Image: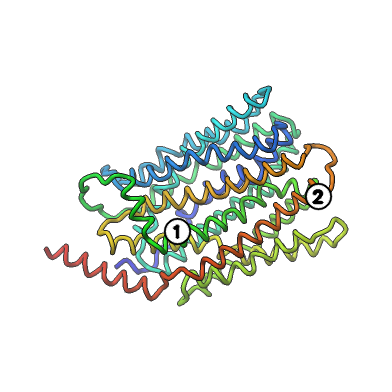
């Protein structure tokens, strides 16, 4: 059983993969909707549909990529080569979506941006699914998996910090026009591409089992759907993704059109991320000897504080109050984000005991699809509602629009977190159960070697 502590350098370098992915995802979630509505001047409904189309493609690519990496048998490994194959297309497509080609008309704009978003989704999938699926190969340890996720989450949040603190200010520094957006997108594309070579270099994979007769994909999905803990995990994780992606997509609108102080956006995001990074070592210590679902439930309570504050916040209220609320929210969000990813690796062990196969690729494919599609669906519905109430970019909007932005930024996330918290109480794969699973698997592997 691989329960020894992993080297520090491996945890740091492995975490850079989520850093790269999150730089792209946060830019596309946090800045891109504002870019579409206020720079391209696309209708909010269409602006919300662009990521939905791109991420719906993941319904095919994520799951099939997971299955492909499960069944690949290259000498260089079944997952690691994909990190190098997907890295360059990932960066190039990310740069292209900010190229601001000046297309006229709603149809032409939508086709271009949705098409490039699809390319980003596919190339990101080629990197992301094999990358996530490597974690169960790196260690069997229940607690070391949480430690890896702590590093991943910390580096992921540094990616969020880069986007929140640098992307829009860099655009303004470069002139704020369409070429400035294109140059900024190119700079961040270079940042996205570089981590994948060192990740490929330091990671490893277990020797795979012999390939059995091909199993239809629908059979994989049927078996996985029958795993109750995985279904519960998907449910409360998807609600959590809506609770983060929807407000991220509207924070710039919230501070620009509701509070009237767009500069608050960078300060709030910076404080939120500082709170998250500071809390991660604390949550890692708290998680020792505790079930991950229990830690997740604790964290949700703190996470909701920012949304309660944003729901009530008024333009004339003290700036310091928003900073305090943002910091506390980051402290809660730290564990709410990292715990579900660590739990997927445990689900793969539970599935191996039931099926005799290692199918973490398919699990990760479905999980990352849920990550993307749930958030994109929430953003699409939110932007559609904004379109319905008559939002006008670069203009003064009425009370109905402002109340709608406030509700979408804070009220809906509160309801999603409460629902996620309720479902998390039904999750039953804790530390004791996982230890028993690993002991049984170890015994079975020993028997196979003896035979």
From the viewer's perspective, tell me whether residue 9 is left or right of residue 418: left
Question: Residue at horizontal 28%, vertical 45%?
Answer: 71
User: Measured from the top left, where is residue 277 in percent x and y?
Assistant: 60, 62
Q: Quadrant of the C terminus?
A: bottom left
Task: Say which quarter of the image contains residue 269.
Answer: bottom right
Q: For mark 2, what is the residue?
A: 258
Secondary structure found at label 2: helix
From the viewer's perspective, tell me whether residue 403 is left or right of residue 239: right
Between marks 2 and 1, how big is the CA–CA gap?
44 Å
Task: Say which quarter of the image contains residue 100.
Answer: top right
Q: Which mark is residue 155?
A: none
Q: For mark 1, what is the residue?
A: 9
Question: Residue at horizontal 62%, vertical 56%?
Answer: 243
Name the image colouring. Answer: rainbow
Q: Is residue 283 above or below residue 31?
A: below
User: Measured from the top left, where is residue 389 in percent x and y?
Assistant: 76, 42
Q: Callout 2 environment at 10 Å: few (<14), some (14 to 19), or many (20+)? A: many
User: Measured from the top left, where is residue 320 in percent x and y?
Assistant: 80, 63
Between 81 and 98, the one nearer to me in the picture:
98
Q: Residue furthest left?
A: 451
User: Measured from the top left, where is residue 110 in percent x and y?
Assistant: 61, 29
Q: Callout 1 environment at 10 Å: few (<14), some (14 to 19), or many (20+)? A: few
Can you see residue 305? yes
User: CB of mark 2 within 8 Å of CB of mark 1?
Assistant: no
Can you see residue 20? no
Q: Residue furthest top?
A: 104
Secondary structure found at label 1: helix
Question: Residue at horizontal 75%, vertical 53%?
Answer: 406
């Amino acid at each position: 059983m691989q329960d020894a502590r992993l080297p520090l350098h491996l945890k740091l370098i492995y975490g850079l993969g989520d850093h790269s992915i999150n730089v792209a995802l946060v830019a596309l979630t946090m800045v891109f909707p504002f870019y579409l509505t206020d720079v391209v001047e696309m209708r909010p409904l269409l602006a919300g549909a662009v990521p939905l189309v791109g991420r719906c493609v993941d319904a095919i690519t994520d799951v099939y990529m997971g299955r492909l990496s499960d069944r690949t048998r290259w000498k260089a490994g079944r997952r690691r080569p994909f990190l190098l194959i997907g890295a360059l297309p990932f960066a190039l497509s990310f740069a292209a979506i900010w190229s601001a080609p000046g297309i006229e008309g709603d149809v032409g704009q939508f086709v271009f941006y949705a098409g490039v978003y699809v390319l980003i989704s596919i190339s990101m999938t080629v990197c992301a699914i094999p990358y996530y699926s490597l974690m169960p190969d790196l260690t069997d340890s229940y607690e070391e998996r949480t430690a890896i996720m702590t590093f991943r989450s910390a580096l992921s949040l540094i990616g969020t910090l880069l986007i929140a603190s640098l992307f829009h200010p860099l655009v303004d520094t470069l002139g704020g026009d369409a070429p400035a957006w294109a140059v900024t997108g190119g700079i961040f594309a270079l940042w996205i591409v570089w981590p994948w070579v060192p990740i490929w270099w330091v990671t490893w994979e277990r020797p795979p089992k012999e390939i059995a007769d091909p199993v239809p994909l629908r059979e994989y999905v049927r078996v996985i759907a029958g795993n109750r803990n995985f279904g519960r995990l998907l449910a409360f994780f998807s609600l959590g993704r809506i609770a983060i992606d929807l407000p991220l997509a509207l924070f710039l609108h919230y501070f620009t059109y509701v509070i009237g102080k767009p500069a608050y956006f960078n300060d709030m995001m910076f404080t939120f991320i500082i709170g998250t990074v500071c809390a991660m070592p604390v949550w890692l210590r708290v998680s020792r000897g505790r079930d991950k679902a229990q830690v997740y439930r604790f964290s949700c309570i703190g996470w909701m504080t920012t949304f309660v504050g944003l729901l009530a916040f008024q333009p004339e209220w003290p700036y310091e109050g928003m900073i305090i609320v943002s910091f506390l929210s980051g402290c809660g969000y730290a564990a709410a984000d990292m715990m579900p990813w660590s739990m997927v690796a445990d689900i793969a062990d539970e599935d191996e005991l039931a099926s005799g196969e290692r199918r973490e690729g398919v699990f990760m494919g479905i999980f990352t699809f849920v990550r993307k599609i749930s958030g994109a669906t929430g953003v699409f519905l939110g932007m559609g509602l904004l379109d319905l109430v008559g939002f006008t970019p670069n203009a003064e909007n009425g009370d109905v629009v402002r109340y709608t932005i406030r509700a979408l930024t804070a009220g809906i996330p509160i309801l999603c977190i409460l629902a996620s918290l309720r479902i998390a109480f039904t999750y039953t794969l804790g530390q004791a159960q996982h230890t028993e699973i690993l002991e049984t698997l170890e015994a079975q592997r020993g028997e196979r070697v003896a035979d």
